[in-house]
Amino acid sequence: MRRVVFNQKGGVGKSSITCNLAAISAARGKRTLVIDLDPQGNSTHYLLGKPASELRDTVADMLEQTVSFTVFNRRPDEFVHASPFPNLFVMPSSPELDFLERKLEAKHKIYKLREALKKLGETFDAIYIDTAPALNFYTRSALIAAQRCLIPFDCDDFSRQALYNILNEIRDLQEDHNDELVVEGIVANQFQPRASLPRRLVTELVEEGLPVLPVRLSSSVKMKESHQSRQPLIHMAPKHALTQQYENLFKVLHGEQVELEPLAD
C-alpha cells in the first residue's frame, strides 16, 4: 500500500504521523519504506538520526537522473537507506529538492515518482510518503503516486478552512490523474479532549459527512521527546497513551477491531 500524509498547513504533525505509523508497520514485521519529499527533511532526521544535508543517495538524486543524461539509470531501491529499526527503511530528503523542482516541472516529470513507487512496491509491503506543507510539484507527484491519503488536522478554524481547499484539490487530482487515490481519513492531531473547541470542530466535521477517523491523537510532550531521541514512540515508549493511540490508528486503517475511549464531556 502506498500512503501519503498531506496537508498544506505546516505544524500539523505530518512527519510525526508518517514516521510513527511506518514504525508500527515495521514493528509488525512488514518491510516498510518512508519517502521524505519535504526539503526540510524532518522524517529523514527523525528516522536516520542525521540531517538530510549530510546524506547522499537521496530522493532528489533519484529524481535528478530522470532529467539528466545518463547511460544507465540506477534502480529506485539503490536510494533507500536502512534505519536503526528492523524492517524500517528511508529514502531521505535533500535540500536539493528546492533547486530541482523547476527542472522537473519544465520536463513534465510528474509521473516519475509513481513509476518508482510501483517498482519499490515489489520490495516493500508498505510505503509512507511525507510531504511539504505546500501543494507543489512534489506533493502533487505524491498524490498521483499514492493509493491512500491521510490528512492531519490540528483542530482550529484556520485548519478547517484549509481542509476544504485540500479536499477540493485532491478531488481534482483524482479526476485528472489518479482515480485509484482514496482519502483514507482526516486525523485529529494534538487533540485536547477536555477543550470545547476541538471537540466542537471534530463533531461538526463528522456531521458534515467528512471522513474523520475515530482515533484522536493527543497533545503530549512525549512526542517532542521522541523527536529529540530520534526514536519513534513504539520503540521509545511502547506503553505510553499516545503510542497506544497511534497503534489504534494503525488498526483502524487496516480494518482491525479496536476499543476507543469515549470523548470527555
Image: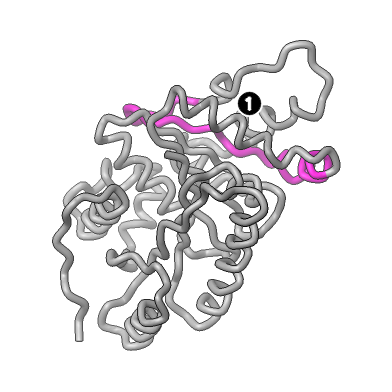
Magenta stretch contains residue 172? no
User: Looking at the image, which is closer to me, 42 or 30?
Assistant: 30
Above or below, 65 relative to 256? above
Q: Is residue 10 left or right of residue 250?
A: right
At 33% across and 65% down in the image, what residue appears? 213
Q: Quadrant of the C terminus?
A: bottom left
Q: Position of residue 256 (x, y in %)?
A: 21, 50
- The three-letter amino acid code for the residue at tag 1 is Arg
Above or below, 41 relative to 206? above
Q: For the residue carrying disc 1, how many other residues have a C-alpha within 10 Å: few (<14), some (14-19), or many (20+)? A: some
Q: Position of residue 254 (x, y in %)?
A: 29, 47
User: Looking at the image, which is closer to me, 166 or 94?
Assistant: 166
Q: Is residue 233 left or right of residue 224?
A: left
Residues shaded magenta:
81-105
At 45% across and 37% down in the image, what residue appears? 127
Above or below, 166 relative to 246? below
Q: Is residue 212 left or right of residue 165?
A: left
The image quadrant that residue 56 belongs to is: top right
At 29% across and 50% down in the image, what residue appears? 250
Q: Position of residue 259 (x, y in %)?
A: 14, 61
Residue behind mark 1: 56
The image quadrant that residue 23 belongs to is: top left
Q: Is residue 190 left or right of residue 94?
A: left
Q: Quadrant of the N terminus?
A: top left
Secondary element at tag 1: loop
Q: Position of residue 114 (x, y in %)?
A: 60, 36
At 60% across and 68% down in the image, what residue appears? 168
Magenta stretch contains residue 102? yes
User: Looking at the image, which is closer to me, 181 or 194?
Assistant: 181
Above or below, 39 relative to 122? below
The image quadrant that residue 28 belongs to is: top left
